[in-house]
Image (cartoon, grey):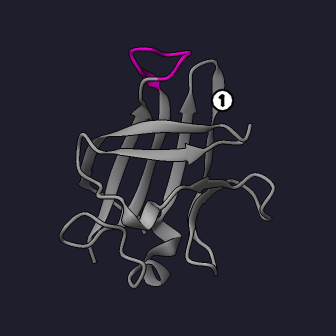
Amino acid sequence: MSLQRIRLELARTTDFPEGSLSHGYEFVAPLDPKGHLNSVEWPQAKGACTVRRFWDGQPDEHGALIHRRNGSWAFSYAPGDDDDEPIFRFDHHLFVEGEYVTVTEHDGVARPFRVVRVAPAVVRR
């Protein structure tokens, strides 16, 4: 299984025309050799598939990468769907440096993020 630690940083937005290094996510996920999420390996790895949301001026949030019954992916921080942050077509994205993904955050706003790092995850058991 190829668990990778992926760092996303806020891409250009109206509020951040240059993007932002201090707003984003770092998460662990199984990737296939091409860099796509591996939903076949996810059930065995889900305990290690964590997420940390970092946002300047706010405390970090810690949760999990979840794969929903309908096949979509989300970041979840507490039981239930209320706090889930769905990720548009996450299973279609290529997780290599320089690619972009869109996350719909707690406030309902879909924001673009750039993949800035993909590296093997060190998972403590």
Residue at 81 percent across and 55 percent down: it is 82
Main SS of residues in magenta:
loop
Position in image of residue 108 (x %, y %): 72, 41
Indicate left or right for 28 with 83 as reference.
left
Residue 41 is one of the magenta-drawn residues: no
Judge by depth and name the residue closer to the eye, 94 or 46.
Answer: 94
Which of 125 and 86 lies nearest the eye of the viewer?
Answer: 86
Residue at the far left in the pictured view: 33
Q: Is residue 9 left or right of residue 2?
A: right
- Give the x, y percent position of residue 103: 55, 46
- Verify whether residue 14 appears in magenta: yes
> In the figure, residue 53 lies in which quadrant?
top right
Q: Quadrant of residue 35?
A: bottom left
Amino acid at circle 1: Pro
* Residue where numbered disc 1 is placed: 59
Image x and y of residue 22, in percent:
47, 23
Report the residue at 64% width, 81% height from top: 69
Number of callouts: 1
Provide residue 12's location: percent of width, then percent of height: 43, 23
When the figure is inspected, residue 44 is found, relative to residue 99, above or below; the finding is below
**Residue span colored magenta:** 13-22
Quadrant where the C terminus is found in the figure: bottom left
Question: What residue sits 38% from the left and 15% below the top?
Answer: 18
* Element class at badge 1: strand
- The N terminus appears in which quarter of the rendering? bottom left
65 left or right of 31 in image? right
Residue 37 found in image quarter = bottom left
Q: Residues within 10 Å of mark 1 (few under 14, many from 20)?
A: few
